[in-house]
Amino acid sequence: MTEPDPPVDPLDALFEGYLNGQLDDAQTADLEARLLADADARRSFVRYVRLHTDLLFELQARQASSRVLDLIGRDLPVPRKRRRRVGRRVVALLATAAALLLAVGVGARLTRTEDEAVAWLENAQDCAWADGEPPGQLRPGRPVRLVGGLAEVRFRCGARLVIQGPAHLDLVSGRVVRLHHGRLTARVPPEAIGFEVLSPQGKVIDLGTEFGIAVAAGGETEVYVFEGQVEAHAAAGGPGTNLTERQAARIEAGRVTATEADPKKFVRAIVPTPPAGVARSARLGCDRPVPGPLPDLRGAGTGLTHRLPGTGGTLFHNDEYLTLDTARGRLELTPTRSDLNRQFRLHQGEYLGLRLSDLGYTGAEDFEVSAVFPDTPELKFIGQFGLYAGARSDRVIRGGVLKLTKQGTEVQTQFLVNNPDGWDADLHEVGLLGPGTDVRLTLRRLGGKYTLTVEDLTGGGASTLAIRHPDYLDREPDLYVGLFAAEPRSDVGQRLLVKELRATVWVPAPK
Amino acid sequence: MTSLDRKTEFARYLAESQTRLYGYIHSLVPDLNHADDLYQQTALVLWGKFDAFDRTRSFFAWACGVARFEAANYIRALARQRRFFGEDLSLLLIEAHEEMADDELDDRRTALGRCVDKLNAADRELLTECYLNPGGVPAAAARRNRPVHGVYNSLRRIRQALHACVTRALGS
């Protein structure tokens, strides 16, 4: 719907142009002359720009109300009728909100809708789902219908199920599933003992470790114990039958009978298939300038080509936070104050790297991005650094090294976190990392599963982190990968060193 | 005076002026991201120069002077050849800012809240997108499939309506 352009007072037009940053030199001079000449015009001007600021705070406060007041509003009265001095309260509110948001940091969400989920999909291989889409939140009562492929579901209680399609099961609770038909293997750690799998003919209670259960179309149930023991019950009731390692049983017609073991029918773990296809790689050795769109502060091309969309908007073309030290063969990145969690100050955020479509990525291929960080800095001044993969700043997965406060002490830890909508979720953090080690980080997607591997190049050893499957990335036709360094709390930056950045996409072999 | 006393004193001065100072800085650089950065920068410089601050003077006026200096450098560094208001006008504008009494500022904010309530939902939504979403006006226009100048026209219409509403509410 088009709006008629009403005749505009030239002074009003200049005020608006000023606020929008649209005035050219001549118009600015015009505005200046008018304001110098007329005290009333000046009074109008300062009140108009005041409106601009107040409007910003007003809109922020309204938005902050829905996000933050639930948390802190119980102590602060929410003004329903606007009273005097509400301005001060708004500013105080924003200040408290800001302080609270700063404290919240990585991994925290202010609205915990996924707290009700008792399980989540952690790994999937060639899955075809009856609904056409992977199940979202796995809450009690949720049916899971897998037409084909393998799905690994991790429960909050610690149990892990590998489900083989075709299968249909219901999540009865955080510790009970009902298998209508299909096969699954359950791995149950000590804290989840008592996990139950119900079947049309009976049920199996796990007493520790690992078992497989298969329910055929007619409801006949077969159980096999890989490790530990289980208690098998027939539907009719009666005492359970204990089964131990390498024992198998059938449950049908109200009875549990021993049977011949057939462990091969069960899949115990999803083994990542090696990447299929031809590797297309880009490698930056940081040992010579490579012309490109993201030069360092002196204008030397770093070879990096794309920032994560939604970041770096107000950074200068010659990036003052980036230095290519060809003599030492490394890139130096000064972290800036930004945080992908809550999309904080991303206009100054350093998230830069490459675009996968440049390597032939079209949306479904396996890929990985890796970087070597020599002599990892003491995280006194760097809050977090590592690698990211995503479509934009609010649809991304990232991982690396993070500074956290645990029980009053600051520690460095490895982390991997999803960010599906601007807020961090499903933070997985593990281990401690001392400063001064050389590490290689690799963020990869193989067979659809995302992992972050942290290799300690100094001391040897590696650890791999997995995470709840970021299905929000599955439908993206293009992804941006690269490295980042951020310090959410201050601008005092120590430099992050990067020795090598490599991105690989496995494209289908030409026929 | 101990350093803790100095900090408390500075904090108090800053707290008293912060809204007005932010408003002044925002009037110099209407882009929020830059206004935010500039505010932080200015506050740091003020703290650094606090010893030299003549307490018989207006803290706000002094702070604005510093802000103006920082803004000029900031804008120059942005490599955008934007002309800045000359010093004569700037001093007059600082005076005009200072002239607005605390009560008037509070009343304006209160009135604005009510005036925003009176907007229709579509206008409020447009404002929220233009002011708060990354990408600002151009992104809001793209999302609605409207030409950018059309959205600027809407923004002008809404802001002028709010300005008129606030002015009416203050009875001035």
Image: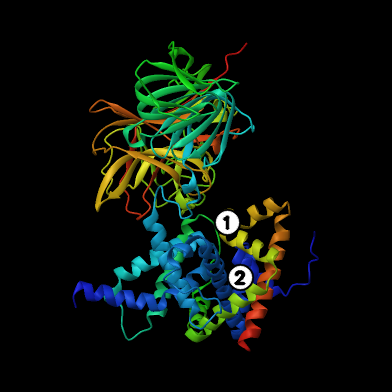
Look at 26% across and 38% down and name the residue there: A432
Q: Which residue is mark 2?
A: A29
Mark pair 2, 1: CA separation: 31 Å
Query: Which label belongs to residue A85?
Result: none
Q: In the image, what residue type sits under mark 2?
A: Ala
Q: In the image, what residue type sits under mark 1?
A: Asn
Name the image quarter holding the N terminus of chain B: bottom left
Look at 56% across and 60% down and name the residue there: B132
- Tell me if I can see residue A500 in this picture: no
Pair 2/1: label in front = 1
Relative placement, left or right, of A90 versus A11 is: left
Quick one: B139 or A42, which is closer to the camera? Answer: B139
Q: Quadrant of residue A42 in the image? A: bottom right
In this rendering, the answer to whether A101 lies above or below A200 is below
How far across and down, in percent of the image, does residue A459 sit?
A: 22, 28
Image mark count: 2
- Tell me if I can see residue A119 in this picture: yes
In this rendering, the answer to whether A344 lies above or below A427 is below
Look at 54% across and 83% down and name the residue there: B107
Instruction: Indicate the chain on which mark 2 is placed.
Output: A
Relative placement, left or right, of B64 versus A277 is: left
Instruction: Indicate the chain on which mark 1 is placed.
Output: B
Crowding at dot 1, Cα within 10 Å, few <14 / some 14-19 / many 20+, comes out as few
Crowding at dot 2, Cα within 10 Å, few <14 / some 14-19 / many 20+, comes out as some
In this rendering, the answer to whether B131 lies above or below A503 is below
Q: Secondary structure at mark 2?
A: helix
How far across and down, in percent of the image, does residue B61 sit?
A: 42, 79
Residue found farthest to the bottom: B171
Q: Secondary structure at mark 1?
A: loop
How far across and down, in percent of the image, does residue A177 sit?
A: 49, 34
Q: Which residue is mark 1?
A: B133
